[in-house]
Image (cartoon, rainbow, N blue to C red):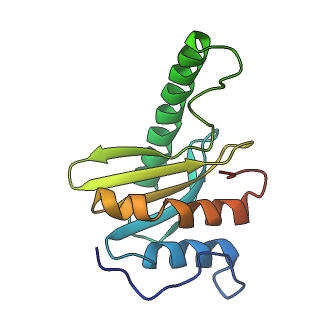
Amino acid sequence: MTTRPPSSPAPVSGALGPLAEALTALEQSAEGCRLAGFGDLGARLVLRAEPAGARPQEALDDLCVQAAEAYALADRLADQLAENLVENLGSPVRASDPVMAWVPGETRLFLRAEQSDDAVFLACDRLDTAQDLVAAARDVLQAVAPDGAEG
């Protein structure tokens, strides 16, 4: 994987606003990252995506629905696993664990906040690109949703 020159995914102030700039930095931080977005899983809406206009709002919101459904399934599985684990081992799945989905030609990474419905979405051309961006996506989520992307 070819990486672009390092850029900070942390929000900075500017004409686009801190969230837009953080998402732009995230999207541009690795070759093969096609889209970085921020949304509300409860409302099932992507509130901001970079590059702006890369996909219609309906397609962005479909990403949010996919993420919400993936996390609902992960939560149900975690609950079932937790019931079968020895007391005090804890759940093997944390609320802020990333979820990935594969569709033809694209790997999607979803990362949600620990205590809210906020989430960061990435669309990448390859699995390794998405995996390489987990920490940077977590940093963006922590900056815009400080309650919760611990881990």
Most foreground residue, 28 or 45: 28
Image position, residue 47 (x, y; %): 60, 58
Image position, residue 3 (x, y; %): 36, 80
What residue sits 71% from the left and 21% below the top?
A: 88
Whether residue 48 is visible here, answered yes or no, is: no
Question: Number of numbered discs present?
Answer: 0
What residue sits 45% from the left and 78% below the top?
A: 29
Left or right: 3, with 81 as reference point: left
Most foreground residue, 148 or 85: 85
Depicted 52 relative to depicted 12: above or below = above
Whether residue 111 is visible here, answered yes or no, is: yes
- Residue at the top extreme? 84
Image position, residue 113 (x, y; %): 67, 48
Most foreground residue, 22 or 40: 22
Depicted 99 relative to depicted 25: above or below = above
Q: Quadrant of the N terminus?
A: bottom left
- Residue at the right extreme? 147
Left or right: 122, with 43 as reference point: left
**Which image quadrant is residue 93 in?**
top right
- Residue at the left extreme? 104
What residue sits 54% from the left and 20% below the top?
A: 76
Image position, residue 79 (x, y; %): 59, 18
What residue sits 49% from the left and 85% below the top?
A: 6
**Which image quadrant is residue 34 in?**
bottom left
